[in-house]
């Protein structure tokens, strides 16, 4: 199972921001998307998740075409988005935030889902009845990631994993992504700290001005940092 992106074009505000990009994301693998601010990373992940329309090109999950579907429809087909900003339903409890991800399932499935979430993030179990809006930024990110896990996705898209978080929290979140990949889930990670991203991912994409300028092994970027450096300078 893979996500295949072919000749994807996105326009925002009448301006082309993605210029026919193509790449493949594999199941059970962590890929990272790197590039300077304005390179097109956010437009790419929003297009993949159905949050913004595409002008042309296709996005497929296996044999299923995702292009043109709403964000909810894309999620139901197996692509879960963890957006930037540690977003939770602040007035609801931690437990209710998690149950939102499994509302359509039976009682046993919801119970199993909660157990799975607390096994991945034990920190949340002690706060299950706490208002989610009162959590720390790191705890909110754990809730957002746990929601994605509970959707039982085939792929997870994680936008800015470490933004504003303490290193100890980032390590916990990174461990969860590694666990996801070991479970066969494909992960696309967008991350401001290239060293962190390249340490987690085996596959890397580098964007520059709405185009993919590198698609290959993360190890290559670690050994040839000038490739990444050039992309950041280009902006």
Image (tube, rainbow, N blue to C red):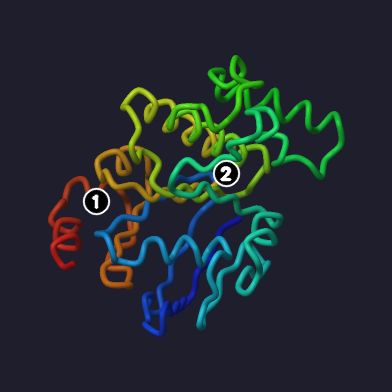
**C-alpha span from label 1 to label 2:** 23 Å
Q: Residues within 10 Å of mark 1 (few under 14, many from 20)?
A: some
Secondary structure, mark 2, is loop
Q: Residue drawn 34% across and 47% down? A: 191
Q: For this view, does 170 lie left or right of residue 8?
A: left
Residue occupying the point 26% across, 46% down: 194
Return the disc, 1 or 2, that comes first in the chain's sequence: 2
Q: Residue at x 16, y 67 (%)?
A: 234
Nearer to me, 22 or 109: 109
For disc 2, the neighbor class at 10 Å (few under 14, some 14 to 19, many from 20) is: many
Residue placed furthest toward the front = 91
- At mark 1, the secondary structure is helix
Quadrant in the picture for the N terminus: bottom right
Residue identified by numbered label 1: 220
Between label 1 and label 2, give the one nearer the viewer.
2
The answer to whether 31 is drawn above or below residue 67 in the figure is above
| Relative image position of residue 44 (x, y in whole percent) | 44, 65
Q: Which residue is mark 2?
A: 185
Q: In front: 2, or 129?
A: 129
């Amino acid at each position: 199972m893979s996500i295949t992106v072919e000749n994807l074009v996105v326009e925002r505000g009448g301006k082309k921001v993605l210029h026919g990009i193509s790449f493949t994301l594999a199941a059970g693998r962590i890929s990272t998307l790197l590039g300077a601010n304005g390179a097109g990373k956010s437009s790419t992940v929003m297009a993949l998740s159905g949050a913004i329309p595409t002008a042309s090109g296709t996005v497929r999950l296996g044999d299923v075409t995702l292009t043109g579907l709403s964000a909810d429809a894309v999620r139901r087909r197996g692509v879960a988005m963890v957006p930037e900003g540690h977003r939770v339903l602040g007035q609801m409890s931690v437990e209710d935030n998690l149950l939102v991800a499994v509302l359509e399932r039976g009682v046993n499935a919801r119970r199993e889902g909660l157990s799975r979430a607390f096994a991945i993030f034990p920190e949340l179990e002690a706060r299950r009845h706490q208002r989610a809006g009162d959590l720390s930024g790191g705890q909110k990110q754990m809730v957002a990631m746990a929601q994605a896990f509970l959707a039982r996705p085939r792929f997870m898209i994680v936008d800015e994993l470490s933004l504003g978080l303490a290193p100890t929290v980032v390590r916990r979140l990174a461990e969860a992504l590694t666990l996801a990949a070991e479970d066969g889930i494909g992960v696309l990670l967008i991350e401001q700290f290239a060293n962190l991203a390249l340490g987690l991912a085996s596959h890397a994409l580098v964007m520059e001005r709405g185009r993919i300028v590198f698609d290959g092994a993360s190890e290559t970027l670690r050994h040839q940092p000038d490739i990444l450096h050039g992309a950041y300078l280009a902006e």
